[in-house]
Amino acid sequence: MTGASRGIGRAIAVALAEAGARVFMLARGPQDLMAAAQAIGPRATPMRCDVSQPNDVERVAVEIGAALHGNTPDIIINNAGLFPLGALDSMTVEDFAQTINVNLVAPFRVLRSFLPAMRTRGGGHVITLGSVADRSIFPRNGAYSASKYGQRAMQEVLRAELRGTGVRSTLISPAATDTPIWDAIDPDNTPGFPTRASMLRADDVSDAVLWALTRPNHVNIDELRLSSS
């Protein structure tokens, strides 16, 4: 799974490991990644990977295949993402493009690395972590919303293409979730954002992921949308 060292990704990795899965944890930052994997224990395998870099993804795909003795993972979780804020007339082209690359192109790159083998095997599950911003727009959120709308469209195409193959796919779209991604924004003191106390928790999202993964094989959860009460 990508983006596994912090926040929602780390919570999902913990939930999967506690459920008995072997978890390949992909993330950029080595310190957070190693700390998260060590806290989980022997079921976690940390793998440093910048999903925006094709060579990194290709390398990790080969390493995972070797670790699984030529097999492909049962589950793919595309979670890594950027959350830049900025008005469209002031955001740089580079920042906009980087957001699309990490949030949309990188999940496609990960899919391409593992999906063909899943199809051949006739089983597996792809989880895509979306956002409330894949259906709703907010000011200063142009790059992020564009990437998440695109991610949702890609997931819907994926579901249509996988129907009847034995490979399942699920989009899980949470509302604002209290994770370190908000630290630099300080939503409690920034107008226009929900307070951290009113947000979902990372464990709420990991619970939803685990629920979708553990439905009977003949059941596909196409999409889950999570909001705080």
Image (spheres, rainbow, N blue to C red):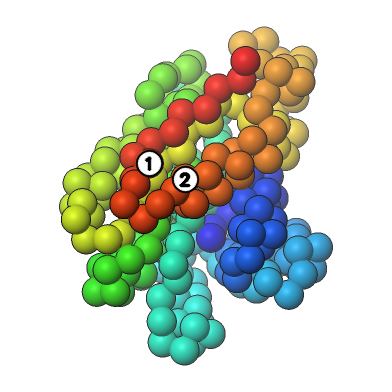
- Label 1 is placed on what type of residue? Ile
Asked whether the viewer can see residue 110, the reply is yes
Quarter of the figure with the C terminus: top right
Q: Residues within 10 Å of mark 2 (few under 14, many from 20)?
A: many
Marks 1 and 2: CB-CB under 8 Å?
Answer: yes
> How dense is the environment of label 1, judged by Cα within 10 Å: few (below 14), some, or many (20 and up)?
some
| For marks 1 and 2 on the same chain, the one whose residue lies earlier in the sequence | 2
Q: 164 or 47, which lies in front?
A: 164
Mark linked to residue 84: none
- Residue at label 2? 212
Q: Secondary structure at mark 1?
A: loop
Q: Is residue 215 above or below residue 93?
A: below
The image's mark for residue 221 is 1
- To which quarter of the image does residue 194 belong? top right
Vertically, is 111 above or below 128?
Answer: below
Give residue 156's position: percent from left, percent from top.
Answer: 26, 41
Give the quadrant of residue 143. Answer: top left
